[in-house]
Image: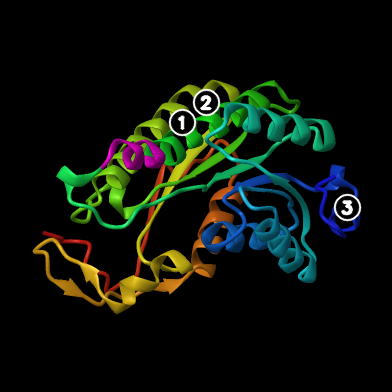
Amino acid sequence: MSGFPGSQDLFHELPVVTRKIALVTGAGSGIGRAVAVALGNAGYTVVLAGRHASSLYATVELAGESGGRCLAIPCDVTSENAVDVLFGRLSAELGRLDVLFNNAGLSIPTTRFEDIGLAQWQSIIDTNLTGAFLVARRAYQVMKNQNPQGGRIINNGSIAAHAPRPRMAAYASSKHALTGLTKSIALEGREHGIACGQIDIGNAATDLSTTIAQGALQSDLSIKSEPTFDAKHIADAVLYMARLPTNVNVLSMTLLPTRMPFVGRG
């Protein structure tokens, strides 16, 4: 199974044929972990993918404590071969896929546009765009060919898909491009019962956003503290999208603190 002690028992507590199957990438921390646990609590068998096995196992433990059933598979989404291995195991051990939360993402410290190195640029694009594409493509293939046909792909975008922060050109570019990918999948997936939508999140309280409450760079280059909100609300929103029948789609959802300086930014 996942190669982690105890995970096989978690996985086999309930016959998988009675449960829908969900895959969460970037499931070892933050938003991915919150969503994976929520899906497990809601009755899904959840496949957890991420780079670090120890972090995935920590998520397995959290999901198991609350009744979730998980299968953890370490995977670097920037590697086509690793993604193929992930889906090979998913298909062999579970037989189908109902929901993908395409969440794995990367950011870099704020960097002036003229100082962004090619390696920095490529690392962001490779994870946030190419990685999302590689995972979504394989999920699409599984959903198209399984019986019954169809499923749902939920891409984790960002507020940066609408309006960038200063000195985050690579990140904003990757998320703008992800929106195009989301709409393309939604368009082509119609005939196969595959719904695709995007959730754009601003200022979730995770390890990656701790500096926002202390002070975030504004459009006028001042630094101001911004409000954050609990990732459990993101999990609730993703669960809402996941539970919809595939003939109904949330193409785009924006989730942010009410007092976040986003509307009217600039």
Q: Which residue carries the number 1 mark?
A: 186
State the CA–CA distance, disc 1 to disc 2. 5 Å
Measuring 22% from the left and 51% from the top, which residue is drawn there?
163
Q: Which residue carries the number 2 mark?
A: 189
Which quadrant of the structure image shows residue 130?
top left
Q: Residues within 10 Å of mark 1 (few under 14, many from 20)?
A: many
Q: Nearer the viewer, mark 3 or mark 1?
A: 3
The residues colored magenta run 117-124
> Judging from the image, what secondary structure is the residue with disc 2 in?
helix
Kindly tell me whether residue 150 is visible in this rendering: no
Image coordinates for residue 107, horizontal then vertical, percent? 38, 52
Q: Residues within 10 Å of mark 3 (few under 14, many from 20)?
A: some
Indicate the amino acid at tag 3.
Gln
Q: Left or right: 63 with respect to 259?
A: right
**Image marks 1 and 2: residues in contact by CB distance under 8 Å:** yes
Which quadrant of the structure image shows residue 85?
top right
Q: Is residue 96 above or below residue 263?
A: above
Image coordinates for residue 59, horizontal then vertical, percent? 69, 62
Q: Which residue carries the number 3 mark?
A: 8
